[in-house]
Amino acid sequence: MSRRQGTLCFTQADHAHTNSDADSDTLSNKEPDTRTHADANDIARTTNETKTDEGNEKLFQSENRDSTDNESKNKRKRKATKTKPQYLPIENIADIYVFGSLDANSALFNFLGKRGIPLHFFDYYENYTGSFLPRDYLVAGKVQMAQAGLYSDSEKRLNLARRLISGASANIVKNLKYYGGRGRNIDNELERIETIREQFDRCTDIAQLMGREGLIRRLYYRTFERILQRSDLKFEHRSRRPPSNEVNALISFANSMVYSASLSQLYHTQLSPAISFLHEPGARRFSLALDLAEIFKPLLADRLIFSMLNRLELKARDFDRELFGCLLKKNAREKFVRAFDTRLKETIQHRTLHRSVSYRHLIRLECYKIEKHILGIEQYDPFVSWW
């Protein structure tokens, strides 16, 4: 498989260059006066009209044969100098992220489907556009019926939604306390967020709960410039589709990566990714992955953004400011994806399991906890970092 973007432009330019080289080489070998390709056409036209100069006709035919031979040789050279394919052990691949266009056949999707490897697609503007998910090999009617039943029960749904938003906001508070302890002046926002969190139990429906979540997010984003302390990168306020500046571009891209990672882990459980509890289920989206991503965005997306920007690993020149917003350049995007993958592989000592667990596996464990809550085995207790 290969990306179209860039490849076609290179081929067309190289093709034009090859034709010119082939003509000049042929003519310089045959004619000491270095005539042009147009001259050869004139000779051929004159020969056909008058039929008096058979020598010129033979010369033109010879030139065409030589030109075709040279062009074929150059095509073979170009084919030989293409980038060699990289061979990756399939056992080492958890997900595949595709940015831009992709040339692929059904054999690839059949192979990945059998191996249980999802593909996540992003468009030119780094927006998540969809996923290829292998067949649901863990599908379970009992779990999905219980999941739909819990969603239909407004009280039970509100209870689970409270727990989800409580975990997400607790991880936001952890981030603020971490940077507040390192000299950032964020006490005012932190105090107001703590006050809002105390109101969750008084919310009587999902709309009120989401309203409180929106207030917390606005206060949280207000602290970003003080956390980052980058004079060359202004955040100002949160903007989406399109992101208006570099920090917003990173937030949108990182959140999409967390959503994709959450969807991949949901695939390995018996839960339906389309039936959610905090976000409203909707057409053409896996809203349970949005619920799950809320827990991990402060840990995986925000902390990685803070770390990379404060270490100057990404700079203003790594972004393109276009007419319709701001985007990461290709090299910067690849750098962030590598850093995100490294973060998913990092391990922590799990307090309950008493063993090392990667961030990627933490997401799956969260899915299992939600599943147990749905089945009535035990109450869901969201993951909250302790560092």
Image: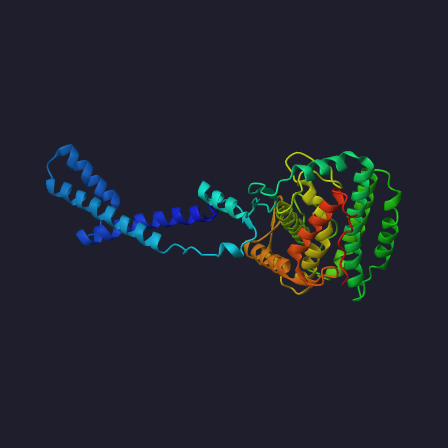
130 to 173, vertically: above or below: above
Q: Position of residue 151 (x, y in %)?
A: 75, 36
> Does residue 373 appear anywhere in the picture?
yes
- In the drawing, does residue 285 fall left or right of residue 170? left
Q: Residue 47: image x %, image y %?
A: 15, 37
Give the residue at x 88% y 46%: 199
Q: Residue at x 64, y 55 (%)?
A: 360
In the image, taking residue 245 as reference, residue 42 lies left or right, namely left
Q: Nearer the viewer, residue 128 or 42?
A: 128
Q: Nearer the viewer, residue 339 or 313?
A: 339
| Quarter holding residue 277 | top right
Determine the image quadrant of residue 283: top right
Here the colouring is rainbow
Tell me if I can see residue 31 in this picture: no
Residue depicted at 81% across the width and 63% down the height: 180
Residue 338 falls left or right of residue 278: left
Out of 344 and 127, give the one closest to the viewer: 344
On the image, the x and y values in percent for residue 387 come to: 76, 63
Residue furthest to the bottom in view is 182
Tally the marks.
0
User: Is residue 387 shown left or right of residue 19?
Assistant: right
Could you say where residue 184 lies in the image, as x and y percent from the top left? 80, 63
Picture residue at 62% right of the left edge, 63% below the top: 313
